[in-house]
Amino acid sequence: MKYLLKVTEFHPKPGNQNEMYYIDDEGEVFIGSARNVTIGKIYQVEASTKLIGGSYHRIISWLDAETTVE
């Protein structure tokens, strides 16, 4: 499913430099490949609709990764 991810926080996933935790403005957690993001910007992502482990969405792909939606 497509989401508009407004980044409020991001952190590297412990033990994995290639993945990051991204937290949106509603407190939902997304885990996906490490990207250069800016807090407050909105990014289009395709992510799992079902919460993995009951706690986060898995980012499948970054849509229009070079541009953001304002």
Image (cartoon, rainbow, N blue to C red):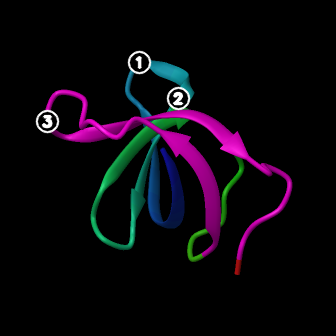
Mark 1 and mark 3 residues within 8 Å of each other at the beta carbon: no
Identify the residue under disc 3. Answer: 54
The image shows residue 33 at horizontal and vertical percentages of: 59, 31
Looking at the rendered structure, the kind of residue marked 3 is Gly
Label 1, residues with CA under 10 Å away: few <14, some 14-19, many ≥20: few
Residue 19 vs 37, above or below: the answer is above
Q: Quadrant of residue 25?
A: bottom left
Location of the C terminus (image quadrant): bottom right
Q: Mark 1 or 3, which is nearer the eye?
A: 3
The image shows residue 55 at horizontal and vertical percentages of: 18, 40
The number of numbered discs placed on residues in the rendered structure image is 3
Looking at this view, is 46 or 15 the one in front?
Answer: 46
Residue 37 belongs to magenta span = no
Residue 15: assigned label: 1
- Side of 15 where 62 appears, left or right: right
Identify the residue under disc 2. Answer: 19
Looking at the rendered structure, the kind of residue marked 2 is Glu
* Secondary element type, mark 2: strand
